[in-house]
Amino acid sequence: MTRIVVGMSGGVDSSVAAALLVERGFDVIGVTMRVWPWKESTDPTQRFGSCCGTEAVEDARRVARDLRIPYYVLNMESEFDRAVVGPFADAYRRGRTPVPCLACNVDLKFGSLLARARAWDAAGVATGHYARVTRDETTGRWLLRRARDTRKDQSDFLWPLEQAQLAAAYFPVGDLDKEEVRAHARRLGLVTADKPESQEICFVPDDDYRGFLRRRDPGMFQPGLIVDREGRTLGTHSGVAGFTVGQRRRLGVGRGTALYVTEIDAAANRLVVGPDVDLERDRLSATDVNFIACDPPRSPMRVQARIRHSHQPAAATVVATDEQEAEVVFDQPQRAITPGQSVVWYRDDLVIGGGVIRR
């Protein structure tokens, strides 16, 4: 019997992922990664992130008990700080807007947790991600595909996975939509069936990333200038870590004219602002690229490119300019291309690859 380790966050998606594997006859082990100290407020509205706290662990434990599978909590606090929280803070320090889920998936779920799963003689790790993995029988290449429910698709958080990681990745809910997942959980009487889902960064209380960064490193927030594209001073800011490209609120400049952050110059501790039209760009460069479905293209390849999770993929070409870098040119300008975010390339439901937006 094939053994699979399931990362259980205490939510309905990972609960159903475990349940589906049990129903399919796998030998399932449930695991929750403890990634943060459990020192929670007694006030539910002030509790730490929804997928990291004691309540989530208890929900996952109850689901494992109902499914009659072994369940463990792994202390991965130091690994999480090193791989996820530290780089998250450093990215903001450098004027970028990071996607911490990438590092969590690559370095923890399909890194450290997969290594532990191997030690338990498991074939791989399953999660509640809405995505799918298939294999090209001709080339032997493992492929990442969008979820059937494109509204819930999370393939843009998984593009850095290498071939060995994809070979060991199981996404049991990738062929279901959200209502089917909840219906399955209700049928089994799982405690997580109607649990609301979180849209927050799991380790940031109340989704207040600025407050989190200030507590971690107050030195990140040094006052600096706000200038227009001609370099004229318009005002001051309280620290570049508190801003992102495309932001309008909290600037305190413009006096009736809508101005947006168009560039963050962390080296000069300066924000450049301008009208909405200044946010339009028709190209970007990406670094840390990973091509999944093919070798890095040395001539322009037609793709649909997605520049943030909420972005509708847009027609573009991508070409690899180095082993770790690529250039993307859009058919039409796109709004607020943001350094630090992911750019992901698709053809229909196939994930060609992705990278981190550099500029």
Image (tube, helix red, strand yellow):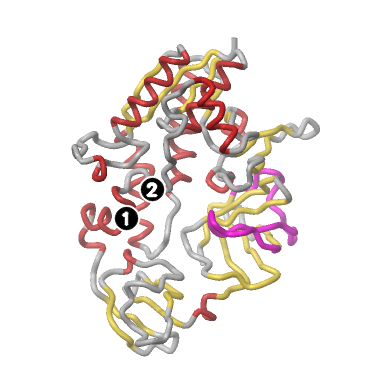
Q: Quadrant of residue 280?
A: bottom right
- The residue identified by callout 1 is 209
SS for tag 2? loop
Check whether the beta carbons of the residues at disc 2 and disc 1 lie within 8 A of each other: yes
Q: Which residues are magenta?
A: 290-316
Crowdedness near tag 2: few (<14), some (14–19) or many (≥20) residues, C-alpha within 10 Å: some
Identify the residue at image location x=45%, y=11%: 68
Query: From the viewer's perspective, is 81 left or right of 197?
Result: left
Q: In the rendered view, does 214 fall on the left or right side of 187?
A: left
What amino acid is at disc 1?
Tyr
- Asked if 107 appears above or below 299 in the picture, the reply is above
Give the labeled residue for mark 2: 201
Residue positioned most to the right:
138
Please state the horizontal and vertical placement of residue 258, each as a whole percent of the image. 43, 82
Is the residue marked by circle 1 packed among few (<14), some (14-19), or many (20+) residues within 10 Å?
some
Tell me the kind of residue under disc 2.
Ile
Q: Which of the 4 quarters of the picture holds residue 154?
A: top right
